Image (tube, grey):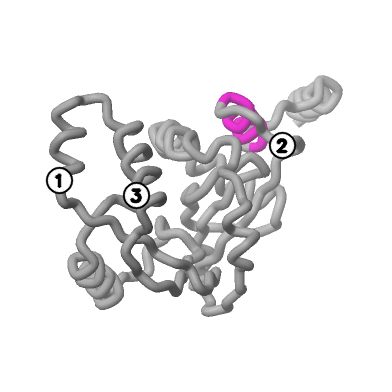
Amino acid sequence: MRSSHPLYFARRIAEVVSNPHSGCIDLPCIGLAIQGMLRPAFFEEQSTIRKNMTSHQTDEVEKEESIQIGTAFYKLEIITIQLVSAYGNQCVVNVEDFRRARPDFIAHSAANIISRLEAGGEKIVQAFKSLCWRCKGIIVEEAALIGVDSLGFDLRVCSGTQVQTLRFAFDTRATSEYSAERQLHDLLFPRIHPKLQNCQEAHQKDG
């Protein structure tokens, strides 16, 4: 979280909560609800915050402007965490487990993978629809990739009047951006076994 005044932070939270969202297929299916308490950061915590802020800034001017003399830092003490599904189901996340958790291998690569696939246009959309039929037996009218991680990816699909999220798992855990994208591509465009391909060609000739 970037540094901000508590009142500004509270105002922004209120704006997000009051903003009406339409049911968009591209929106993530799961929300994260965090209940906590803002408090002034302790002295030892402030040094860590300043170090983290400057480590992500290469411009000396940015460093000077971002951390001014007299700047106050606040910390959000997390009390409870809940995962909220699109259907309103809530799952409590253990706070200690959350603190011990580490980012996914491709946490910073998911956006790049999604962007490249979206650039594929209608070809990729049709491949998503075909995948839903092959693996899930579901005919979908719309499909959008909303998330990728080291274990698989999530598709937000529209089938008739129902909008749902389908999970597709990789054969092996991806340890790099290339590995994840390669496995995703293999699922979308599976290779046909040579014997099966010959049978299909022979069948076409007979027809």
Please name whichever residue, 102 or 106, is drawn nearer the observer in this view of the structure.
102
Few, some or many residues within 10 Å of mark 3 (<14, 14–19, 20+): some
Q: Is residue 70 left or right of residue 132?
A: left
Secondary structure category for the residue under label 1: loop
Dominant secondary structure of the magenta stretch?
helix
- Is 182 a magenta residue? yes
Q: Which mark is residue 46?
A: 3
Q: Which residue is mark 2?
A: 173
Crowding around mark 1 (Cα neighbors within 10 Å: few <14, some 14 to 19, many 20+) is few
Q: Nearer the viewer, residue 111 or 136?
A: 111
Q: Is residue 102 above or below residue 112?
A: below
Q: Nearer the viewer, mark 1 or mark 2?
A: 1
Q: Earlier in the sequence, mark 1 or mark 2?
A: 1
For image coordinates 40% across by 36% down, the residue present is 115
The numbered mark, 3 or 1, whose residue comes first in the sequence reads 3
| In the displayed structure image, the side of residue 54 where residue 141 appears, left or right | right
Q: Nearer the viewer, mark 3 or mark 2?
A: 3
Q: CA distance from mark 3 to mark 1?
A: 13 Å
Q: Which residues are magenta?
A: 178-187
Quadrant where the C terminus is found in the figure: top right
**Callout 2: helix, strand or loop?**
loop
Whole-percent x and y of residue 164? 55, 65
Residue 121 drawn at (x, y percent): 40, 36
Where 114 sits versus 2, above or below?
above
Query: Which of these two is toward me, 111 or 69?
Result: 69
Cα–Cα span, label 1 and label 2: 46 Å
- Give the percent coordinates (x, y) of residue 192: 75, 27
Q: Is residue 196 above or below residue 128?
A: above
